[in-house]
Amino acid sequence: MASCSVSIYFLLPLIAAMSAAEPPGCRIRITNRGLEMLKYETQKFVVEELSNITMPEMKGNEGRFQYTINEVKITELNLTYADLAFQPGLGLLFEVQNSSIALSFQRRVLYWFFYDTGAINASAEGVNIHTVLHMTKDELGRLKISNITCDASIAKMKMKFTGTLGRVYDFLATFLTTGMRFLLNQQICPAMNHAGLVLINSLLETIPVRTEVDKYVGIDYSLLSDPVVTSRSLDMDFRGMFFELGNESNTLVNYAVNPIVREYDRMVYLGLSEYFFDSGLYSYYKAGIFQMNIANERMPKDLELLLRTTYFGTLMMMNPALVEYPISLQLELNSAPKTTIKTSGATVAVTAIVTVMVLPPGTAPVQLSSMTMEAKFNAKVSMKGKRLAVHADLRRFKIFSNQSALESLALIPLQGPLKTMLQISVVPIINNWTKRGVSIPLADGLDFIEEVVEYHNGYLIIGANLHFSKGLREMIERKIQADAENTI
């Protein structure tokens, strides 16, 4: 019995670890300041949607009057008060208070033997709309509006008749305004539902979830849980994991610390853990791109001369004829690079095998030596638009022999030239690759501006403001058009 209790005691930490939630590699916070910027675009979009409301034809009779009302058009919306705010635990609240809607429609009225047509101008006043957008993640890990709670009311409605008998049947206004107010009120919430569940969700579909970065790797930005909404912010945890396209199941396990966002001053914050970068380096390593052959025109002449001098004795012992042939360096990483993020900045540690080869024409290369290279790069992270880029600078460099300590001493003269070769030939290639950047999970048409990068122990935070490069309506229409073209 005692041994059973001891076994359970030791199993508890394992069970707890297995049940723990997967840590995010990427975290995004949208603050009240960001929501304030979105409010104008949202208000403009809602006005456009409500302007497209269509109402059914009204027919009926009142006493000796027979009437038909049609061609209803909303001519103006005056949103006296409109607000977009976070709804804690749910999502977003869009609220309209004490606003007005101007309408025009056509009438056809038959009174005894008199037939009259004309326009009616009407205004709905005291318009109140209370809409809550419930934000969740769907089965693919995409952010979506899963439900909308809407309540709309119109305090009163006025009509102004024109035409031959306008003054005669003004008393119909009371009857018609009651019906028209009811019908208009019934159309507001369906219009808001369509705007959120169909149109806004189509825009959210432009946020990358699992997509290719290039021909070697892809990235997984699926949400790990529903967004956390407070009165001050909306926080989203993304997997933030790169994967090799040739073997998508071979991924790095996330043991990194969670990025912690504490600020609210800027519109948006992006937190990236060491895992975000390590999973990318691991995927590229597995894809086999961390290999390089430096020979012929890519080999600096002074370095080749130094290598030839260093290994002259070896060449003479192997075959004196080899002295005249070109020498090459083959660099190949023997493990995935490792990222370290501290308050002082980010670094990437690299370990590679450097093989010195002589290249006799028409035959296989001949190995002269093999050495281990250890290098550390400073990594400067930057944002442009919504693409994350990294610039590397060589910080430390060391080589040593895999054969003997004596040979390691003989390699000391090579340290400086090899470091220079890395800086001139290899680092620019790396930076040319990394400057392309990778997209962050942000909707099409929305970009980061005025970015500030802060480094913490185990993660970094990018605080920024947001900029609409396109209007909300334009972004949605482009997405709908793209979907239509893809179905053809």
Image (spheres, rainbow, N blue to C red):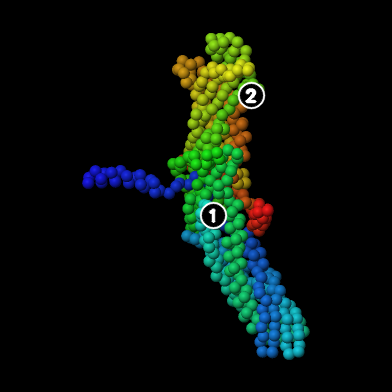
Circles 1, 2 touching at the beta carbon (< 8 Å): no
The label number, if any, that marks residue 143 in the structure image: 1
> In the image, what residue occupies the spot 60% across and 39% down?
215
Q: Amino acid at mark 2?
A: Arg
Question: Which residue in the structure is indicated by mark 2?
Answer: 298
Q: Residues within 10 Å of mark 2 (few under 14, many from 20)?
A: few
| Left/right of residue 392 with respect to residue 456 in the rendered view | right
Q: Which circle's residue, 1 or 2, is located before the other in the chain? A: 1
Where residue 94 appears, x then y in whole percent? 56, 64
Front residue of 267 and 478: 478
> In the image, what residue occupies the spot 53% across and 32% down?
377
Relative height, residue 325 to residue 424 (above, below): above
Task: Quadrant for residue 153, please give it.
Answer: bottom right
Disc 2 element? helix
| Left/right of residue 379 with respect to residue 104 in the rendered view | left
Where residue 201 appears, x then y in whole percent? 58, 58
> In the image, what residue occupies the spot 48% across and 58% down?
230
Can residue 334 be seen by looking at this rendering? yes
Disc 1 element? strand
Where residue 276 appears, x then y in whole percent? 51, 42
Q: Amino acid at mark 1?
A: Leu
Relative height, residue 118 to residue 216 (above, below): below
Q: Residues within 10 Å of mark 1 (few under 14, many from 20)?
A: many
Front residue of 1 and 74: 1
> In the image, what residue occupies the spot 54% across and 22% down?
355
Can residue 396 be seen by looking at this rendering? no
Task: Quadrant for residue 435, please give it.
Answer: top right
Task: Quadrant for residue 472, please give it.
Answer: bottom right
Front residue of 212 and 474: 212
